[in-house]
Amino acid sequence: MIREEMSRRKEVALLTSAYVTSTDEVQKDRLAEVLFEIDDLEVSRFMRALMTPEATLRGYYAAQYLAQRGDRRALSIMNQNYFKYPVSSAAWASTVQLFGKYRYRPAISHLIESIDAASVNVAAAAVESLQLLFPGSPSEFKSAAEAKKYFRERVGRQP
């Protein structure tokens, strides 16, 4: 509830200043989470500076924020840290969807391996992304094994 209220107020300068001056790692994570909810050019700049190749919670919020806006570097970092971030599978499924939305082909092998993920959300997002990356794909598959086989074959046919 507090996070939603802080996001709603959109006091970007106050939040970024609190982040910079804080020495509390948990507080920094929460501030990054609040900033993640604010669509603002200054937040984009801040998240770009905050983005790191390490699979930290803060790194996730920064890379996810930018990936949602189609940033290729952020997508690359998310792909390098595929399934390594300390976030829920529901949160990760939203990242998996971005690989398809922005036609990020370097994630194809991870997406194929996610087709039979334990999380139904991640598995469905992986298939959806692969369908976007491979136009003309079937809209449904009988099993995860069938979908994996199909997309592996499609990869083999790519120039």
Image (tube, rainbow, N blue to C red):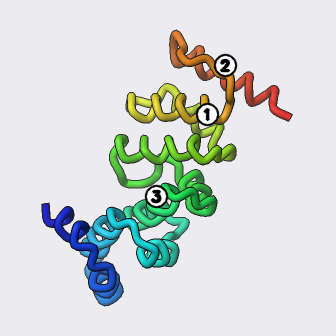
Q: Nearer the viewer, residue 6 or 126?
A: 6
Front-lying residue, 35 or 93: 35
Q: Label 3 is placed on what type of residue?
A: Gln
Is label 1 or label 2 in front? 1
Q: Is residue 5 above or below residue 79?
A: below
* Distance between mark 2 and mark 3 Cα atoms: 29 Å
Q: CA distance from mark 1 to mark 3?
A: 19 Å
Q: Which sits earlier in the primary sequence, circle 2 or circle 3?
A: 3
Q: Which residue is mark 2?
A: 150
Relative placement, left or right, of 50 versus 153 is: left
Residue tagged by mark 1? 132
Q: Could you say whether the residue bearing mark 3 is in a helix, strand or loop?
A: helix
Residues under numbered marks 1 and 3 in contact, where contact means CB atoms less than 8 Å apart: no
Q: Quadrant of the C terminus?
A: top right
- What is the crowding at mark 3: few (fewer than 14 residues within 10 Å), some, or many (at least 20)? many
Q: Is residue 25 left or right of residue 131?
A: left
**Residue shown at 41% from the left, 74% from the top:** 43
What residue is shown at x 60% (from left), y 29% (from top)?
131
Query: Where, by quadrant of the figure, is residue 20 drawn?
Result: bottom left
Q: Position of residue 132 (x, y in %)?
A: 61, 34
Residue holding disc 3:
64
Instruction: Name the secondary structure under disc 1.
Output: helix
The kind of residue on which mark 2 rests is Tyr
